[in-house]
Image (tube, coloured by chain):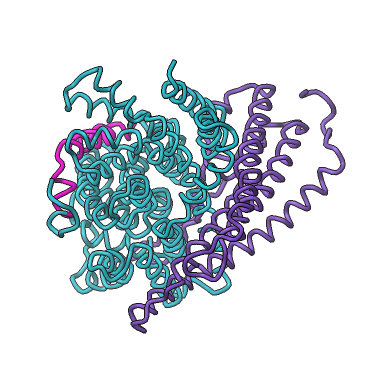
Chain colours: A purple, B cyan
Amino acid sequence: MSNGPEKSEPAWLGSARTFSRSLDRVISIACIVLFAALVLTVVWQVIARQVLQNPSVWSEELARYVFVWLGFFGAALVFSERGHIAMDFLVRKLPNRWLRVALILAQLAISGFIAVVFVWGGLRYVEQAWTQSLSALPLTVGPMFLVMPISGALIIWYSVLHLVEALTSATPRDLLVAEDVPVIAPPTTDTLDEGPSSDTSKEA
Amino acid sequence: MDTASLVGLILLIGIFGCIALGFPIAVSIGLPSLVAIVTLVGFDSALIASPQRVFTAVNNFTLLAIPFFVLAGVLMNSGGIAGRLVDAAKVMVGKMPSSLAQTNVVANAMFGAVSGAAVAAAAAVGSVMTPRMVKEGYNRPFSAAVNVASAPAGMLIPPSNTLIVYSLASSTSIAALFMAGVGPGLLWTVVVMVVAFIGSRRFGGNVATAHVSFGQGLLVLWRAFPSMLMIVIVIGGILTGQFTATESSAIAVVYCLVLGFAYRTVKVADLPKILLAAARTTAIVMLLVGVSGLLSWVLSFARIPQLVADGLLGLSDNQFVITLLMLVILLVVGMFMDPVPAILIFTPIFLPLWITFGLSPIHFGTVITFAFCLGVITPPVGNVLFVGSMIAGLRVEPVIRRLLPFFFGLAVALLITAFLPALSTWLPIQMGLMAPT
């Protein structure tokens, strides 16, 4: 399985990757918009109650569903970036052949779990709860629940892509995520005395 | 074999097997839980119940505090808060011997408190302090060790995302938990300060106590004041009952945003990037919370906590011995797992046993968090250790050697936290947030 020429990639893999990057961008924009909406909704809830003395009846429910949508779409994006917390310190010690097997198993596990719970089970539940009303918003549960099968389908797309990469990559080791690095590069401004050398924030 | 043992076996082998194989932890929890649920109720019921469990676990208004605190933390980080806090810490402890080491510890406690993230604290404060300590002649691995050891205190000092996760897993009050975290969080900081003080005799540098005039000192504290005020607003709002934890976290976001604009360190053009960074962290935690909804359901359905309790009580009926045993298990688990999934997995298993001892679930929250805080600075999996070493430009091994005395001191502090309930519960009881036990 690990023999073959350096570039044993099927030709369509490149276009699949390009498509994935566009998909990433769409999901990112959705997450940004949803997050902004989430902040505004809860801030509105506080203003309505504390300032206007007129508590909002719908803001809490709206915030919850916006958050769930944000979370599931964000989860799909993080799957695309292989960013979910995992412990690969054992797998790292494996020789390439077995490392590849572990990577393939991981993607099969992701696809299998997501397919059953998020997509299959999710769609069944959407069907069942399609007309069940929410308590405060003029909406029903089913459509709100659609986020699970939708994000599930996205996750499976990414996972299948990663599976193909694990099968075809000449260097499966590159497919491991780098060691955990802080998401945030720490910029440091003015300080009291001697200026700190704050150029040490390496991002791997 | 009865069903409960079978399910227990599936979960034990499945979860740890999947984690060892390097699967994402969310899937490592979810897949075996799904298999266990299918064993218990059959495929058809599992198919319809599982997505509901995942969805219900995350469709929770309290959980919303996490994205907001994460976002506030990212905003603070982009806002150059670390430098101001380091300066304030220096004014506070700069006159002590080993002043730079103490400054690092106090700055980490403050930064951890406002940002709630140990890794961010180690990165932000470490990148200011470690080079400065080395320049003043401190031993480099020791400087990194001081930074690494002090960073997790912020996970105990409120506001803390880790405590919010525990509050979800245990259905306990966030306000009470936040107040309960103060004592152990300060204990953590003091222990690190003491060990750093002793260690500085051997590994310390010049006793550079730059003289700061009173007026200058006041100015520095004033400049750090707005960042510290955030804690007051958030905690004050929750304690006075003006806001829920979620609302006060949203206010923290607005406050940090205003601060960032006022300091001109955050630009409107940066906001999408900042929101996206916070969305990623949020999604990782949310997925874990969601699949843990499956796990905790199957655990209680198969009565696994009772099984574990019977097993532990079979070894000894001495409460002291059982508690020690639990602490050892938590420490070992913490060496390998991140705090959030570890709390989500082990709270439903150990909490019922803890309660049968007549102890408070609030107290257990600080104990389990303290134990897993130690986990983030221990190998083989310890984010804070890795980041702190990386920032010092070191491999992990030399830092671990200098960290050993800190481990020892903090392990003693863990014992104190576990066997002295008042350290955690005194403050929330005084504030009327929990009933005296």
Rendered residue at 52%/50% (across/down): B55
Rendered residue at 23%/62% (across/down): B91
The foreground one among A110 and A60 is: A60
Relative vertical location of residue B208 with respect to residue B301 in this rendering, above or below: below
Q: How many marks?
A: 0
Residue A12 image offset from top left, x and y in percent: 85, 44
Relative vertical location of residue A53 with respect to residue B15 in this rendering, above or below: below
**Is B323 left, or right, of A166 in this rendering?**
left
**Is B180 left, or right, of B8 in this rendering?**
left
Which quarter of the rendering shows the C terminus of chain B? Answer: top left
Rendered residue at 55%/37% (across/down): B46
**Is B33 left, or right, of A192 in this rendering?**
right
Residue A154 image offset from top left, x and y in percent: 68, 50
Residue B81 image offset from top left, x and y in percent: 38, 64
Q: Is residue B402 magenta?
A: yes
Relative vertical location of residue B84 with respect to residue A91 in this rendering, above or below: below
Residue segment shown in magenta: B401-428
The foreground one among B285 and B300 is: B300
Residue at far bottom of view: A52
Residue B114 image offset from top left, x and y in percent: 34, 60
Q: Main secondary structure of the magenta part?
A: helix
Look at the image and tell me whether residue B100 can be seen: no
Look at the image and tell me whether residue A59 can be seen: yes
The foreground one among B358 and B74 is: B358
